[in-house]
Image (tube, rainbow, N blue to C red):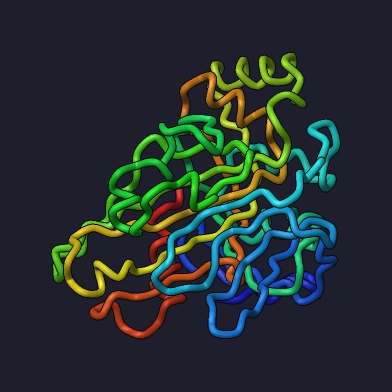
Amino acid sequence: MKSETTASKLDITKIAHGLMRVKVGQGKGFFKVGVEKKHGEANSIYFEINGARKFEVGNDCDTCHFWFKCLHEPRLSAQRKIANLPKTIQLPRPVDESMIQELSPLLELMEKGEYDIFETAIHLAGPYDSEDEGSYFFNNEFMELWDINDPKEEGLLSDWEHYEGQRPRIFRHPDTGLTEKQFEFIIPLVPRAALKEEYIKLYQSMIANGDRPRILIFCMYQRGIPESVKRGHAKNMHSFLAGFVLDGHHKLAAYRRAGIPAKFLTILSHKASKYFLLKNEGNSPRARMEERLASLVS
């Protein structure tokens, strides 16, 4: 149901328990998704910061996988806050309308559009660099499924580190016999070398004492259908949840050291996401995607 008390710029709807949809009517566009229209080709999707393209984050092709390329280093400081968020965001509490209202300063940095907000937990592996053969992009199943011969030649990554979920989440489709694996990527905007060790240790101590501080990410969900699946030649497919860290780089490093699943407060852009359907999944990609997102709520 829609809120009757929302601020003038935010239209908030509860989709499911812990999953909220927000329509930002006016935004500053500091964080923005750009789409480059290409005649006869798939349109490229970009993550832009303050008017400059920083990452290419895949395309809108229905048979393509997610990837990201760092085009220009973001050069954000780990010591500066993006927005003056209230400390109450860190308290153990549900993602509901009151939290969304408190997130208004951050949401107003986005561009006009629709966003889903929820909390999820990811047990992290990494970080991996662009030539780390332990990463997803060098996985044999990935290369076979998406017809990749050499990830290095494909230029899927560009000298920027990222984290991954330790294990994919599994979704089974009994009607088709397909197994769908969801892979998760967390991409920092501040390199590890710029972090302060004392802050990482402080959060490590908090985590060891049972606290679970939230990390804010700007997120997208991309699900293409490989040609081999469309033709019935393959019985598995991959989908992707990817997030850029807006706030919480020291927390990210602390969670990884602690070996504890990290808590992510996720702002998912509909514009940056794609969710193509299998033949038996109806004709509402948005409903199916939000059903999937609801299953990720922690």
Residue at horizontal 45%, vertical 52%? Answer: 297
Q: Position of residue 157 (x, y in %)?
A: 56, 46
- In the shown orientation, is residue 39 left or right of residue 126? right
- In the shown orientation, is residue 90 left or right of residue 241? right
Instruction: Give 256 or 64, whichever is nearer the viewer.
Output: 64
Residue at horizontal 48%, vertical 54%? Answer: 241
**How many numbered marks are there?**
0
Q: Position of residue 73 (x, y in %)?
A: 76, 44
Residue at horizontal 38%, vertical 56%? Answer: 295
Q: Position of residue 124 (x, y in %)?
A: 47, 33
Relative height, residue 286 to residue 85 (above, below) = below
Relative height, residue 294 to residue 27 (above, below) = above
Instruction: Give 7 or 63, whichever is nearer the viewer.
Output: 63
- In the shown orientation, is residue 162 left or right of residue 61? right
Q: Residue 166 is drawn in which quadrant?
A: top left
In which quadrant will I find the N terminus? bottom right
Q: Position of residue 252 (x, y in %)?
A: 61, 31
Residue at horizontal 46%, vertical 76%? Answer: 286
Q: Residue 189 is drawn in which quadrant?
A: top right
